[in-house]
Image (spheres, rainbow, N blue to C red):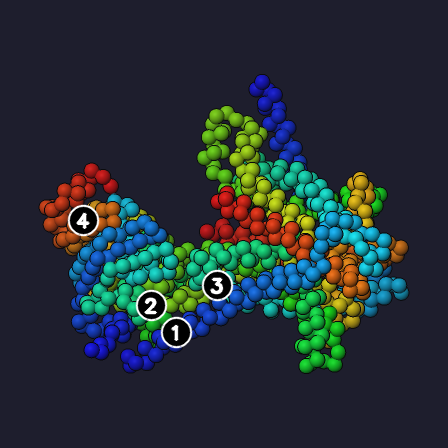
Amino acid sequence: MIKTKYQRLTKRYLTEQIMLMVMRLAALAILSVLAFILYTIAAKGLKSLSWEMVSSLPEGGYYLGGSGGIANAIIGSLLMISGSAIIAILISLPIAFCINFILKKGGWFGNIARFSMDILFGIPSIVYGAFGFLIMVWLGLQASLLGGIIAVAFLILPIMVRAIDEVLIMVPSDLKESLQSLGATRYEMMKVILKSILPGVGSAIMLAIGRGIGDAATVLFTAGYTDSIPTSVNDPAATLPLAIFFQLSSPMEEVQNRAYAAALILTIIVLIISLSTRQLTRRIK
Amino acid sequence: MLITRKLKDTIATRLMVIITSGAVLFFVAIGLVLLVKGLPVIKSHSLTELLTTSNWKPMKGQFGFLTFIVSTLLVTLLALILSFPLALLSSIYLSEFSSQKIKKFFMPVIDLLSGIPPVIYGVWGTLTLVPFIADTLAPHFVDFSTGYSLLAGGIVLAVMILPLMISIFLEVMESTPQDLREASLSLGATRWETTTKVVLKRSTSGILAGVVLAISRAFGETIAVMMVCGNFTAMPKSLFDACYPLPALIANNYGEMMSMPDYESALMLAGFILFVIIIVFNTVSWFILKRIKRSL
Amino acid sequence: MFTITNTSKIEPTTNNNETQDQASISICNLNVFADKHQILKEVNLVIPPKQVTCIIGPSGCGKTTLLRSLNRLHDNNSLFKVSGCVKIGDDDIYQAGVDVPALRRKMGLLAQRPTVLPMSIFENVAYGLRIGGLSDKTQLKKLVEENLVAVGLWDEVKNRLHHSASQLSIGQQQRLCLARAIAVDPLVLLGDEATSALDPISSRKVEELLISLKSRMSVVLVTHTLRQAKRIADYVAFMYMGELVEFGEATKIFTHPEKELTNDYLAGSFS
C-alpha cells in the first residue's frame, strides 16, 4: 500500500521534470530564433555594407547594379520619423494628461478614451497607410514626405499615448494632492508633473520611434520613393523599410545584396533604440 | 493675476478635452471613411457574392474575396498553432519556474523580438525559410514549391506574434497572488501541479485574451507575410502552395487601382473588413483583460 | 559504514505512524538570509507536539520567516538562503533528498488572508486529498464533509458545495482554508496571523477551532496581538530582531518572563 503511493509520487515528479525540460526547450527555441534572425541579417548584410552604402545617394544605374548608396533612404526615414514624433508628442501628451488628470477616474469618457487608444493601437499599419492615402487624395496631396509623416504619426500616436499613460498612472497621488493643496490650478499641476515624468515621456517617444521607423506598410502609398533627399515636405521621400523591400524584389543579385545591407542598417538602428529604451525605463523604475 | 491663471487653466483643459475627443472620433472616422469608400462595390455586387466567391478578375469586374479571406484565416491559424505552445510553455517557465536571473536575461529578448521591424522578418524569411522549404522540405511532400508559401508565411507570422502573446501571458500569470501558490504547495502539490491546477486555471480567460489579441495582430500583418507567402490568387491546396492574405492584396494593388472606381472600392472594402474583424477581436480581449485587472 | 539516509520517512503515508505523530519539531542554529540581509540569527527552539505554540514579537522580527522555514517555502525564492536544521523527530527536513511536497503536506499552512483556490467549495477541500492520490468519490465526499463539519462550515455550505468558493464571506473563506489544511491530516498546522484579516466574531471562531485541533496536531501560530496569544497559547516564543529571546510555557512567559526585553514588550514599551 505504501509502495504504490510512493510510486505515484515519483510519477508526479517525473512529470514535473519532463515539463520543466520541455519548457526550457521552448524558451531556448525562442532565444535561438532571435539569434538566428540577427545572425542571418548580420551575416548577409555585412558582406555588402560599406561606407559608400551609408553615405552616398544612388547614382545612375544604381538599380541595375551601378554604384551609390542608400543615404536617401536613411535621411528620408530620419526626417519622416522626426516629423511624426513631433506631431505625435504634441497630440499624445494632452490626451494622456487629459485621461489621467482632467477626466473623472473610472468615468465613462475616460474609459472610452482609453478603450479607443487600445483599439487604435491594434489597427494594422496597412489600414493607417490606406486611410492616410485617402486623406491625402482628399486634400489633393501627392505622395510626399508630409504624407508619410502624417501616416506614421497616426501609427505611433496610440503607442505614445499608452506608454505615457502607463507612466502617469504611476504618479503618486500624494504629489497630485500636495500640489493642489498648495493652490495650483490643474494646468499648473500638470506642468509640474510633466517635468517629473520627463524620462518616462522620453522612453515612450523612443518606443514609438522604434516602431515607426521600421514600418513599411504605412509609407508604402503615402511617402513615395525617390533617389534624392527631399528638400521640402512636399517632395516624395525614400525610407529604409521600402528601400529594403524594393531592392529585395529586384532580380539583380547586386541589388538584392544591398537590400541585406540596408536591412542590417535598419536592424542596428532599431536595436539601439530598443536597448536604450529599456535602459531608460529601467532607470525610471 | 488669479484671473489669468484661471483663464489659462480653463483654456488648457478645454483644449485637452477637445484633442482627446478628436482622437476618439478619429477611430470612428477611419471606419466610416473605409466603409463609404467600400460601399460602391457592395452596391454593384452583393456582399454575399463578394465574400463567398473566389473569382478575382478586377479587369472584368469580378471581385470574389474568398481566396484572400481563406488565405488570411489559414496563415493566421498556422501561426497560432506554431507559436501558442511555445509562448505558453516559455511564459509558464518564466513566471513559475525560472530564476530571477534567467528572467532578467530573457525579458530583453522578448523586447527585441517585438521591436524588430516586419520588413526584417520578411528578409529573414526570404533568406532562410523560403529556400529551406523549396529545396529541403517541400520535395518530400509535393512535386514543386517555390518556397514562397503558406508555411513560410505562417512561420514568420508565428515568430512575430510570439512576443505579444508572451508578454500578455506573463502579465496574467504573474497576477496570481503568491499566497495561492503557497496554499497549493502547502497541501503537498508539486510546482507543476500548482501551475496547472491553480495558476493556469486562474489565468484561462487572460490567456484567451492574449490569443485573441495575437490573432488580430496576425490578421493585420502585411509586409512580412507578403514577402514570403507568394501572393498568388488561387486557393492554396497544401502548406507548400502560395497564398494571398487580405493585407497583402491591399498593399500590392493600392497604387494602381485609381483608374477603376470599383477596384478601389473593393480594396477599401477589404480594408474595412480587416478593420471590423480587428476591432471586434480587440474589444473582446480588452474587456477580458480589464476584468482581470479589476479583480486584482 | 553504509548508512541509508532514510528520506522516505518524510512521506505522506506516515501520518498514522504513532512515533511520528508524537514527534516534536526541533529547530537548531537556524539562520535565514534574504540577499545579504540576515533575517533569522541562530534560532534554537523545540516546538512541543500537540500544543498551541504562539510566536510573538514586533513586526519585522522574523516571525513569519521562521514559520515559513518550517515547510521550506523559502525554497522557491532564490534570494533566500537557509542554514541550520529543522527536525521532525530525527529527520532533518533540510537534508538532501527530502521529498519537499510530501514534507509540506505534513506542515499545513493557514495564511494571513484566506487563500481560496479558483474552484468550488467542495474542490477546495478535496484539492489536497486528490493531490495525495485519493480518487474514490464516496471517500472524497465523506472526508470533505467531515472536515467541513470540523470547522463548523458544513451547515452553512452544504447546499452550495459546487459553487465558487470566492463567494463566501472572508470569515467563511478562512474556515474553508482551515478545513482544506486539516483534511490532509498534517502533523503541524502553521498559522501566519491567521485571524488578522477577520472580523472579531469569525476571528474568535477560528481561535476556538485552533484550540480544538490540539488533539489532532501541533499548532504553531504567528500573532502580533498579545491578547490572542494569552487566550490560546500553551507555549510562547518571543522573537526580537531575528533572534529568539525567550521560549517557555505561556503562563510563565506572561507572568514571570526571564528577560527584560520580553517584559518590556509584554508591558507595551514597544510593539
The location of residue B95, given as percent across then percent down, is 46, 60
Whether residues under marks 4 and 3 lie with C-beta atoms below 8 angstroms apart, the answer is no
Badge 3 and badge 1 both on one subunit? no
Badge 4 and badge 1 both on one subunit? no
Please name the residue shown 37% across and 58% down the image.
C77
| Subunit of label 4 | C
In this rendering, is residue C91 above or below B10? below
Whether residues under marks 4 and 1 lie with C-beta atoms below 8 angstroms apart, the answer is no
Real-space CA distance between mark 2 and mark 4, rounded to the nearest whole angstrom: 31 Å
The location of residue B130, given as percent across then percent down, is 70, 70
**Does C24 sit left or right of C115 as displayed?**
left
Q: Mark 2 points at which residue?
A: C101
Q: Residue A183 carries which label?
A: none
- Badge 4 marks a residue whose secondary structure is strand
Q: What residue type is labelled 4?
A: Val
- Badge 2 marks a residue whose secondary structure is helix
The location of residue A106, given as percent across then percent down, is 54, 43
Q: Which mark is residue A12?
A: 1
Q: Name the residue under label 3.
A: B92
| Subunit of label 2 | C
Q: Which of B142 and B34 is in front in this view?
A: B142
